[in-house]
Amino acid sequence: MAMNRRSTALSLFIVTAFIACVFLTVSEGAESDLGECEPKTNTSRRWSLTLARVRNESGQWVEFTSTREMDDESAVHITEQLFECGGRKMIRLQGTLKDPFSGEKLDHQLKFHHMTGPNTALINKGYTVVKLKVDGNGPVLTSRPLRSGELFEVRMDKRGTSKGYANGIGVTTHKPGDAIIPEHINSLKSGTWLLYGPDVYSNSVEIFHKYTTSNIYNLKPGDRMGVMRSETGALHFFVNGVDQGPAASNIPEEVYGVYELWGDATQATILNPTHP
């Protein structure tokens, strides 16, 4: 599926060796807008680097110390550069250090977030959720917000036969671990767009009666259901890979995928292109 610019930019950091430059600019006088003099800051990766300079008895700046909160054997080498910008005298301290995240493998695959409700547990490295008590329910959220155009797809692995209905899927603006999330997420009065059976609900109110003829209450083990927020903010549901069409519009940009072990559903797995 399509990926937004943030995922493309983040993928640039998956490298085996990376050298980062840290810039600190100090000016003489009051603070002002430095314009083009201000170095661009990369906020995709963060670590702690503290610089301090001290004065001698004559009031002159004579030295500085650097402190890093990371376990790394290499030293920080910093140089000082004097220059002018916009008629002002500037001091730039420039240093290099090894990226503490070098070699880290970033896992962008969707998983279920480890903070689940009391009636659910995760197995299979977070890709599979199981219900602890058959008679209860269990909503689980994705480990991160969905990207625009990204399909959140779940396969139902197991189901019982006592209730005659199963499954609920959709998106929510609520975050994993939010204390407001109940055992049945469709009882929430805000921040939800969900498919139960053939109908679409928002904030516990039905907004699209008989949205699909592919009733997800009737799915069997091995069947799949999914949801996607398009790049234009429309919400689409999928059943066994088939787009059921737009179900809602103006969906907020940051939403989490949510699946509920509703009714007879007792186990389900998130599907990713490289994870069966």
Image (cartoon, grey):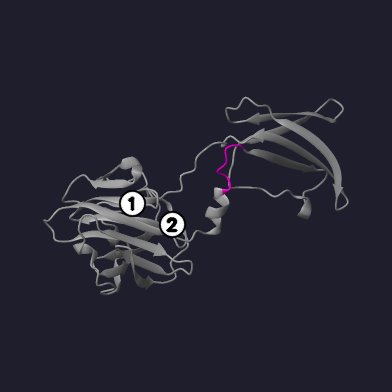
Q: What residue range appears in magenta?
A: 12-17
In the foreground, 126 or 61: 126
96 lies left or right of 163 = right
For this rendering, which residue is in front, 65 or 154? 154
Q: Position of residue 259 (x, y in %)?
A: 31, 56
Q: Which residue is mark 2?
A: 146
Vertical arrangement, residue 26 with respect to residue 175, above or below: above
Q: Position of residue 210 (x, y in %)?
A: 25, 74
Q: Position of residue 257 (x, y in %)?
A: 37, 56
Q: Horizontally, is 180 left or right of 252 in the view? A: left
Element under disc 2: loop
Q: Nearer the viewer, residue 187 or 148?
A: 148
Query: Dot 2: within a 10 Å radius of its alpha carbon, few (fewer than 14), some, or many (20 or more) residues?
Result: many
Q: Amino acid at mark 1?
A: Ile
Look at the numbered disc 1 and give the secondary structure of its residue: strand
What amino acid type should be assigned to the residue bearing mark 2?
A: Leu
Q: Residue at x 42, y 70 (%)?
A: 234
Main SS, magenta residues: loop
Can residue 272 be seen at all in this image of the molecule?
Answer: yes
Residue 62, position as x, y percentages in the image: 82, 28
> Which residue lies under the disc numbered 1?
270
Q: Place residue 47 in its image quadrant.
A: top right
In the rendered image of this protein, does residue 111 appear above or below residue 196? Answer: above
Report the residue at 62% width, 24% height from top.
73
Instruction: Answer whether labels 2 and 1 touch (C-beta < 8 Å).
Output: no
- Neighbours of disc 1 within 10 Å: few (<14), some (14-19), many (20+): many
Which is in the foreground here, disc 2 or disc 1? Answer: 1
